[in-house]
């Protein structure tokens, strides 16, 4: 489950507005590489909509099925707002509805099946 925590207004090329919902996953504990201490965080992603602003405003606080997943991307620069430091990222976070798998998850499942089949064939020989 994810919770809709806010919405954002964006502008199309033709100048009309459209709205994104900002979804947040559950709390996760992450080990800091810098300090060695754990901290609480939650993944966030935006979801495009066809809703008007009042509908988006009314959805804030609602929960919906699905999850936020890390998706590998081409490297791109990102500026950390608090420090102004520019770093390179190779991922983004995306919302996936229940029952939908990422390509990486699909490949992992296929690999596990292939290895399982290989082990069964070796036992049969």
Image (tube, rainbow, N blue to C red):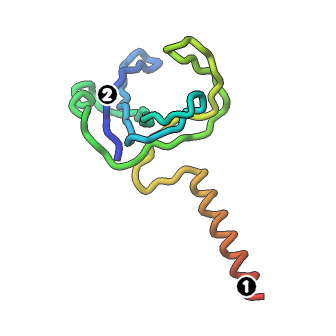
Q: Residue furthest top?
A: 84
Q: Residue 71: x, y in percent?
A: 57, 40
Task: State left or right for residue 87 relative to residue 47.
Answer: right
Left or right, 89 with reference to 66:
right
Which residue position holds label 1?
A: 123
For image coordinates 54% across by 13% down, the residue present is 83
Quarter of the figure that contains the C terminus = bottom right
> Where in the figure is residue 14, as x and y percent of width and height?
44, 17
**Are the residues flagged by discs 1 and 2 in contact, CB closer than 8 Å?**
no
At mark 1, the secondary structure is helix
**Residue at coordinates 51% horizontally, 34% vertically from top-left?**
37
Left or right: 29, with 77 as reference point: left
Task: Name the foreground residue: 122 vs 57.
Answer: 122
- Location of residue 45 with respect to 85 vertically, above or below: below
Mark closer to the chain start, 1 or 2: 2
Classify residue 54 as left or right of residue 94.
left
Residue 92, by quadrant, is top right
Which mark, residue 63?
A: none
In this view, the mark in front (1 or 2):
1
- x, y (%) of residue 96? 44, 46
Q: Which residue is situated farthest in the front direction here?
A: 36
Look at the picture and state if 85 lies above or below 23: above
| SS state under label 2 | strand
- Using the numbered discs, state the Cα–Cα distance from disc 1 to disc 2 in whole angstroms: 55 Å
Q: Residue at x 31, y 35 (%)?
A: 4
Residue ID for mark 2: 6
């Amino acid at each position: 489950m994810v919770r809709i925590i806010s919405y954002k207004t964006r502008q199309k090329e033709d100048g009309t507005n459209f709205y994104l919902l900002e979804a947040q996953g559950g709390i996760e504990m992450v080990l800091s590489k810098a300090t060695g201490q754990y901290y609480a965080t939650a993944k966030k992603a935006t979801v495009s909509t066809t809703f008007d602003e009042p509908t988006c405003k009314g959805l804030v606080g609602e929960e919906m099925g699905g999850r936020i997943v890390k998706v590998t991307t081409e490297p791109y620069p990102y500026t950390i707002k608090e420090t102004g430091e520019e770093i390179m990222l190779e991922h983004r976070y995306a919302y996936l509805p229940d029952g939908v798998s990422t390509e990486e998850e699909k490949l992992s499942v296929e690999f596990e099946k292939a290895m399982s089949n290989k082990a069964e064939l070796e036992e049969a020989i």
